[in-house]
Image: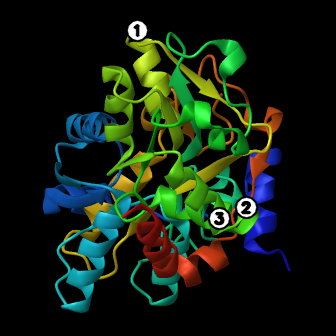
């Protein structure tokens, strides 16, 4: 019996696709008859809108997208479900632990779309209750026009050096669910004392990865800590002097799961959109924008390493699932 940690090792170290399984049918005619769907997502806003535009052009089905940070999306979804109001059809967050918990609660409709077999086992539920839309590389990046190569931090511990005081910025796990996994595992690896020391080094906390990116582009901070690499890659492509670092003590790779919501108003349109999420046009978007596809048959983004070539810290999602609230609370106590 493989643990969730063992399965994650498979995706980041070998990127082998899962066991073959039957594809579930999608009724396109019924989806078009429904004519619309509601999508809650933490996908970066520009990428999310591109996906919506591609889908609407292909099928003529209107997508109402509500986009926010992963933790904010989950709070809204859970509050609505607890109140018995199912108004959303498809949910995409960046919290595999939460997706596993909601699967146990029976909140999702199992669905195995086309290309399901090309998504590694560790990035999906075997029954199709959630399937990764993309893989998120969480690491460090910096303004390389302001920090010389000789002064770059090569480990997470290096960030505690006083020479970086007042230069760092980090997303908030209470807003960005990706950071729940990063902070939770860092607290396991290095202890909460690590974050207390970071606090003394004047790390600025902002809501999400977009705010981190904006702070570096404006030069208000110079080093992004535990942040999403695809933002740095996109900013580099736009001409900003940003360099991604791969600490010798490891990065984190976190899937962004998508789920069809059980009992949603537009179930056929939701299934069609979930299947479209794994299509070539959408999966090619992620490496084109500096991110990593959920599919094992897609290449790494240009200029970025294959995940097999870097050290990856495994995420214990069973632990994150149980301790999510405590992780956010402790982090906020330290940085308030």
Q: Could you tell me residue 88's position as x and y percent? A: 22, 69
Q: Residues within 10 Å of mark 1 (few under 14, many from 20)?
A: few
Cα separation, mark 3 vs mark 2, equals 7 Å
Q: Residues within 10 Å of mark 3 (few under 14, many from 20)?
A: few
Q: Residues within 10 Å of mark 2 (few under 14, many from 20)?
A: few
Vertical relation: 64 (above or below) 158: below
Indicate the colouring scheme: rainbow
Vertical relation: 22 (above or below) 32: below
User: Label 3 belongs to which residue?
Assistant: 193
Vertical relation: 148 (above or below) 154: above
User: Label 1 belongs to which residue?
Assistant: 239
Q: Quadrant of the C terminus?
A: bottom left
Q: Residue at x 58, y 59 (%)?
A: 195
Q: Could you tell me residue 220's position as x and y percent? A: 34, 27
Cα separation, mark 1 vs mark 3, equals 37 Å
User: Label 2 belongs to which residue?
Assistant: 190
- Give the label, 3 or 2, closer to the camera: 3
Mark 3 and mark 2 in contact? Answer it, CB < 8 Å. Answer: yes
Sequence-first tag of 2 and 1? 2
Vertical relation: 154 (above or below) 124: above
From this viewpoint, which residue is outermost toward the right?
1
Q: Quadrant of the N terminus?
A: bottom right
Sequence-first tag of 1 and 3? 3
């Amino acid at each position: 019996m493989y643990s969730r940690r063992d399965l994650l090792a498979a995706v980041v170290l070998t990127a082998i696709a899962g066991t073959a399984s039957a594809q579930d049918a999608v009724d396109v005619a019924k989806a078009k008859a429904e004519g619309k769907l509601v999508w809650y997502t933490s996908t970066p806003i520009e990428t999310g809108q591109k996906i919506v535009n591609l889908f609407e052009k292909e099928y003529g089905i209107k997508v109402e997208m509500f986009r926010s940070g992963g933790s904010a999306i989950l709070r809204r979804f859970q509050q609505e479900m607890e109140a018995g109001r199912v108004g959303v059809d498809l949910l995409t967050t960046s919290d595999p632990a939460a997706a596993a918990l909601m699967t146990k609660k029976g909140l999702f409709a199992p669905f195995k779309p086309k290309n399901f077999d090309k998504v590694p086992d560790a990035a999906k539920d075997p029954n199709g209750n959630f399937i990764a839309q993309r893989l998120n590389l969480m690491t460090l990046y910096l303004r390389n026009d302001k920090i010389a190569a000789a002064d770059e931090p090569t480990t997470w511990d290096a960030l505690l050096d006083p020479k970086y005081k007042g230069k760092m910025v980090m997303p908030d796990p209470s807003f960005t669910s990706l950071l729940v996994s990063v902070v939770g595992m860092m607290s396991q690896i290095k202890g909460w004392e690590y974050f207390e020391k970071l606090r003394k080094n004047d790390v600025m906390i902002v809501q999400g990865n977009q705010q981190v990116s904006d702070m570096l582009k404006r030069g208000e901070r110079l080093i992004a800590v535990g942040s999403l690499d695809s933002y740095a890659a996109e900013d580099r492509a736009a001409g900003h002097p940003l360099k991604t670092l791969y600490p010798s003590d490891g990065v984190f790779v976190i899937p962004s799961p998508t789920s069809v919501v059980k009992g949603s108003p537009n179930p056929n349109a939701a299934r069609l959109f979930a299947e479209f999420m794994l299509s070539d046009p959408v999966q090619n978007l992620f490496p084109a924008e500096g991110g990593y596809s959920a599919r094992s048959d897609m290449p790494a983004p240009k200029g970025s390493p294959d995940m097999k070539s870097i050290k990856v810290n495994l995420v214990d999602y069973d632990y994150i699932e149980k301790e999510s609230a405590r992780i956010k609370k402790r982090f906020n106590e330290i940085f308030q």
